[in-house]
Image (spheres, helix red, strand yellow):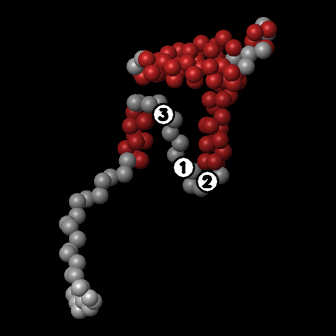
Amino acid sequence: MTPVRQSFDQEAAVVLSACLTVDRTEMEDVADVLRWVDRSLIRLCAKFSDYSPDAFRALLEAPQDVAQAIMDSRFPMPRYIVCDQHKSEAHFLMAKLAIPAPPPSSPPPPQRRRPTETRPICGRI
């Protein structure tokens, strides 16, 4: 491990990146700044992070393992659908989760108004 990697301060890097991002948003288009932030973070992680592909794979699979454990404890067992965005499984899932709009209804009947009491106004004018 190189001395730079050993002494790398992640919190300082985050603060510096945030300051640079705020400064760039004042001068550039937001979409360009977002692309720059993405590229910068990817480069920063690739250069200084210390992870192996197996450990990264474990991070991605952990939520699926938790979901499987929850499903195993339920009866009847719920259906688990692994889907990628904009694929047929995702469309199926969104169709199942979509809440239909309520049918148009007639307006509520007008309410009767109570007759107002009239009181004489007493006082000096």
From the image, tell me which residue sits under label 2.
74
Instruction: Out of 111 and 117, give the one closest to the viewer.
Output: 117
User: What's the residue type where badge 3 is placed?
Assistant: Cys
Quadrant for the N terminus in the image: top right
Q: Across the whole image, how many numbered discs are drawn on residues?
A: 3
Q: Position of residue 79 (x, y in %)?
A: 52, 46
Look at the image and tell me in which quarter the C terminus lies. Answer: bottom left
Residue 81 pos. (x, y %): 50, 39
Residue depth check, mark 2 versus mark 3: number of the one nearer the observer? 3
Q: Residue at x 69, y 14 (%)?
A: 48
Q: Secondary structure at mark 3?
A: loop
Visible in this render: residue 82? yes
Residue 122: mark = none
Q: Does residue 121 sit above or below 95 in this rendering? A: below
Q: CA distance from mark 1 to mark 3?
A: 16 Å
Q: Are circles 1 and 3 on residues that touch, CB within 8 Å? A: no
Q: Is 105 left, or right, of 86 in this rendering? A: left
- For the residues labelled 2 and 1, say whether their Cβ atoms are less than 8 Å apart: yes
Mark 2 residue type: Arg
Dot 1 falls on a residue whose secondary structure is loop
Task: Name the residue beneath numbered marker 1.
Answer: 78
> Residue 83 at what x, y percent from top left?
48, 34
Left-right relation of 57 to 80: right
User: Is residue 50 something that shows in the picture?
Assistant: no
| Label located before the other in sequence (2 or 3) | 2
Which element is circle 2 on?
A: loop
Whole-number angstrom distance, CA of label 2 to CA of label 1: 7 Å
Residue appearing at x 62%, y 19% in the figure = 16
Please tell me whether residue 58 is drawn above or below residue 27 in the rendered image: below
**Number of other residues with Cα within 10 Å of mark 2, as a class: few under 14, some 14 to 19, many 20 or more:** few
Which residue is identified by label 3? 83
